[in-house]
Amino acid sequence: MKAMLVETAGTADAMRWTEVETPSPGPGEVLIRHTRIGINFIDVYYRSGLYAWPSDSIIPGAEGVGIVETLGAAVSAFAPGDRVCYVDRLGAYCEKRTIAADKLVKLPDSIADDIAAACLLKGLTVHYLVNASYAVKAGDVVLVHAAAGGVGLILGQWLKALGAIAIGTAGSADKVELAKANGYAHVVNYRSEDFVKTVMEVTLGEGCAAVYDSVGADTWRRSLKSLRKRGMFVSFGQSSGMITDFKFSDLAAHGSLSANRPVLFDYIDKRPELLERAGDLFRMIESGLVTIQPPELHALADAALAHSRLEARQTTGSLVLTT
């Protein structure tokens, strides 16, 4: 089979379309044939070397959808032909892979492969953000950066369903309009407007209850300024670079704030929690409370082009690779 292999960390071109051995499933594992593979910023972080590698070379990819082909010993929850999806740190940018069966989730018939690959990692992220990082209540004013991105579009709709007032930031007029169509009551073009000012106008000077910040270096200081006293700063990504100069005293200076730096895998590492969060996500989609935008599709062999577009912030919604 073929895979996108990275042997030296670097730019998108570090990924090489390479023939590799097709693995066989061991005990407790399943061999799946990928149909769709989601692209996420975590893939960029590993490919670039921002996140440490577990071995000398890696196959990027944290999210996959596929068909079960072969079962390893002691696997009883799945059968050949089952449609499944998963989230893992690495290993998805390939035609086939083995994976522990307890990481797999069966896909409902109502959810197409494209949609599943566009939303599983992002939707699970939204679930823990609004339930665990900060438990959103009806009437809360919440600020979301990258509102027109894959997580942002799901998050805006979920916040609206909870009765919250969502303020988003986006980087172009088209992205502003897209965010407004996906649950945001107010959207700020961060290239020409001050989102802190908008938050204070909406909240009559009080500040918002929480900020969900996946941008990092470019936004975190003003994110803190947007919060009300005892508000929650949730930093769950760093698309503009790592936050390097944060101090605990910054929380005190802006009103006894709290800060949370969550990682999705800590919220789905137990199978019952994975199934609960995935089940809630699928129900939100099936009910129509959350609509997943059709993703931008690229061939697996063109993953470098897709990464380049993502890093240049030329995309909205999700990117998905096809095999």
Image: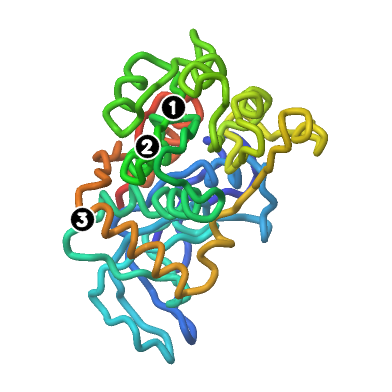
The alpha-carbon separation of the residues under discs 1 and 3 comes to: 25 Å
- Residue at 33% x, 65% y: name it: 279
Q: Amino acid at mark 2?
A: Gly
Q: Tell which of 18 and 147 is nearer to you.
A: 147
Q: Image quadrant of residue 50?
A: top right
Which residue is located at x 37 percent, y 62 percent? 278
Callout 1 touching callout 2 (CB < 8 Å): yes
When asked about the image quadrant of residue 96, the answer is bottom left
Q: Secondary structure at mark 3?
A: helix
The residue that label 3 is drawn on is 286
Q: Is residue 302 visible?
A: no
- Image disc number at residue 168: 1
Q: Amino acid at mark 1?
A: Gly
**Left or right for 257, reference 154:** right
Q: How many marks?
A: 3
**Considering depth in this image, is 164 or 294 the residue closer to the camera?**
164
Task: Say which residue appears at 55% left-offset and 60% top-offset.
Answer: 265
Distance between mark 3 and mark 2 Cα atoms: 17 Å
